[in-house]
Structures are given as C-alpha cells and as structure tokens.
Image: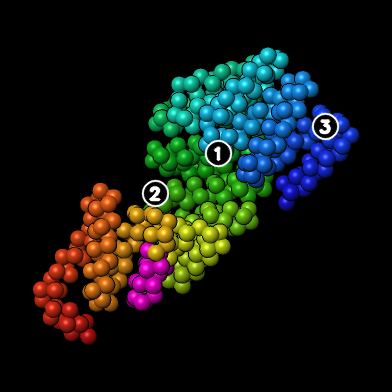
Amino acid sequence: SRNQEAEKAFSAAHEIHSRIGNNLGAANALDGLGNTYRAQSRNQEAEKAFSAAHEIHSRIGNDLGAANAVLGLGKTYHAQSRNQEAEKAFGTAHEIHSRIGNDLGAANALLSLGDAYSAQSRHQEAEKAFNDARTVHSSIDHFLGAGNAFRSLGNLYTTQSKYNKAELSYRQSLAAYDRANDGDSIARALLDLGKLYHTQQRYAEAEEAATEALAIWTSIDDEEGQAGASILLSTIFRSQSQHNQEMDALIQAEAALARTGHHTTRAATLGRMGDIQLAQGNYPEAEECYHLAQAIFLSMNDPRGEATGLRGLGKLYVRQGRHAQAEECYAHARLIYAGIIDEEGEADTLDALMGVYVMQRKFGDAKVACMEACEIYTRMGRPMSDMCANTWEMLQLVEEHPILPLLAGLFES
C-alpha cells in the first residue's frame, strides 16, 4: 500500500541521514515516519517517531521543525483520547509558531487545540480557539484553513444542539472551501450539513446535501467518501421508512467499503441489509447477508459483532420455523455476550431464546432462561422486559394446567 511504501522510504532516508550525521534530514525523516504511522493508527510507533524528531529539532535549534513535531505528537495523543497531553502539545506548538511569526502554523495549532478542548466538553474554550484560528486564516487569505475553522465551529454547535448557528457555520465553511476550490472539503462540509438536517428531520434537504457530497466524491474517485455519503443516505431513507431506497444506498456503501477494507462498517452494513431482506420476506438473500457479516466479524475477532450476526440469523430461522437452528444461534450469541460481560446483549438474547424454547414446548429450558434474564435485569437495576414477564406468566399457567400445551398441540394439528 501507499503507507507501506512511504514507511520504507522514510526509514531508508532516516538511516542514511543518521549515518552521514545530517541531523535535520534525520529529524525530517522521523516526522514523515510519524505521519505515516499515525495514518495507520500505529500510535505508539508514531509517538516514538515524533518524540525523537522533536528532540533533534530542539537540539539543533530548528523551531519550525520542533513545532511541527510537537503538533504531530499532539494529534497522536488526541487519537488515543489522551486529551490533556494533546492540549499541552498543541499549546506548545501554538506558542512556538507565534514566537517565530508563522501565522499559518499558529492557526493550525489553534484548530487542534480547539479539538482537544471540544473532546473535554470545554465548549467556550473550543469556540474561542476555533474563532481565533478563523481570524488568522482569513487574515492571510488561507481559505482552506478558514473553512476548517468554520466546519469545526459547526460541529461544536451541533454537539450543543445550537442548530441555527451550526447551519450558518457549515454554510460559511462551504463558501470558504469553494474559494479554496477543494472538492473533498466541500463534500465533507455537505455531509456534516446533511447530518444536521437529518437530526432536525429536514429530510429533503438532508438527502440533497448527501447526494451532492456523493456526486463530488464519485467525481474524484474517493471510495471512502462515497461509502460515508451512501451510509448517510441510507439512514435518511430509513428514517422515512423508504426501505427500497435505503437498500440501494446500502448496496452502494457495501461495495465501496469492500474496496476500501473498512471491514467493521461493511459487516454492520451487511447486517442491516439482512434486516431489510428479512422484513421483505426475502429469506435466502437475508441469510446470505447475515452469513457474510458473520464471516467478517469472525475474521476480525469481533465478538460483539459476531453475536449481533447470530441474533439476525436467529430471527430469520424463527420466521422460517427453523426453531432448532434459531435456538442454536441464540444460545451461541448468549454465551458470547456473557464472555464479554455485555449484560444488556445477554438479557435481550435470553428473551429471544426463551421464546424459541416455548415454540418448541421446552418449558423447563424456557423457565431457566427466564430466571437467568430476570437476574440480569435485577443486576442492571431495570424492570424485566415484556417478553420475560409474559413468558413467566405463561409458564406459571402451564405449571398449574399441564393439559394446556397438549390442547395447543391438538389445535395445531
């Protein structure tokens, strides 16, 4: 991949520069390595590379290099939610850039600082940092930076449910990106705007924004962007119960996700496709989707995803009257949830399992499942589910009147 090639090149450059005693070259190669590792979420290696680069830049008195290395270090901390360390690093980068009169560097450090504040719900400080960054970017006619600042403000206002201010900020970011002639950034802002409209149930506007973003990403052949826009479109259609359009959008998203290797999102998308096929009575297609999702989650060692897939298959088998297979799926899913200590998942699965036991007249098993579910609901401090309560009531009736199941069997036959 491109990252592997870059890693190879930067490693070779670092080795050569170190051997000939070129400190600046070695530090720059370490910066490149840090960015390459960060792009692959190899955060420990990125941290090591940026720290080493920062040490060299500081030692040889290269302020610009030191500021950029500490900014990279801050972004690596931020990616790991180490927000206080990130804040400190971004503050240092801003201080150095300001001291050496590098306005663009100072403004970019402010944007990152705003992100660190935002992650800690320090909204006023984040808003000030984003506004300060916007002012600097605008003063030097750096439209891409100004657009990023407006978009960050839009995201901040959205998290605070200040929707009018968020919409205005996104519109301002679009105007700035338009002046920068940056298609990818325009599409990102449109996607944010689409999400905002969806939150407000302004579905026609949400669909228009997401469709426009999709068209841009398609024109520049950005598969990741296409997947994101298609997923948003599917959500917009789902909210309006337009399941055929939702399915079309999911098919488009799944194809893009398969090509980009975003396995977790792809598996979740296949699961949703299975749900739609199941609701429409397309059982073979639903089963295929669930099995595909299941295989992906298994290959990724994602137990929660695997359990979700098993529950989807369980629902399908119940609908088809394949009760023994449904029981197998739910029992397996229940064990997975217990293993990862997901009590909510385990209780929900026990609810489904007791239903399958009742359908097979395995009343003893149903009673055990019901009691185990009740224990979990009590531990979680939640009232028992309707399924649990109804099953318990029915089981008591069966115990009081053992002839009831026999009569039910007679009527069925």
Tell me the number on the disc at residue 89. Answer: none
Q: Earlier in the sequence, mark 1 or mark 3?
A: 3
| Residue 82 visible in the shown view | yes
Secondary structure of the residue carrying tag 1 is loop
Residue on which the image places disc 2 = 239
* Residue 7 position within the rendered picture, expressed as x and y whole percent measured from the top left: 75, 45
Q: Amino acid at mark 2?
A: Ser
3D distance between C-alphas at marks 1 and 3: 28 Å
Secondary structure of the residue carrying tag 3 is helix
Residue on which the image places disc 3 = 25
> For the residue carrying disc 2, how many other residues have a C-alpha within 10 Å: few (<14), some (14-19), or many (20+)?
some
* Residue 216 position within the rendered picture, expressed as x and y whole percent measured from the top left: 62, 42
| 328 in magenta | yes
Secondary structure of the residue carrying tag 2 is helix
Q: Earlier in the sequence, mark 3 or mark 2?
A: 3
Tell me the number on the disc at residue 80. Answer: 1
| Residue 115 visible in the shown view | no
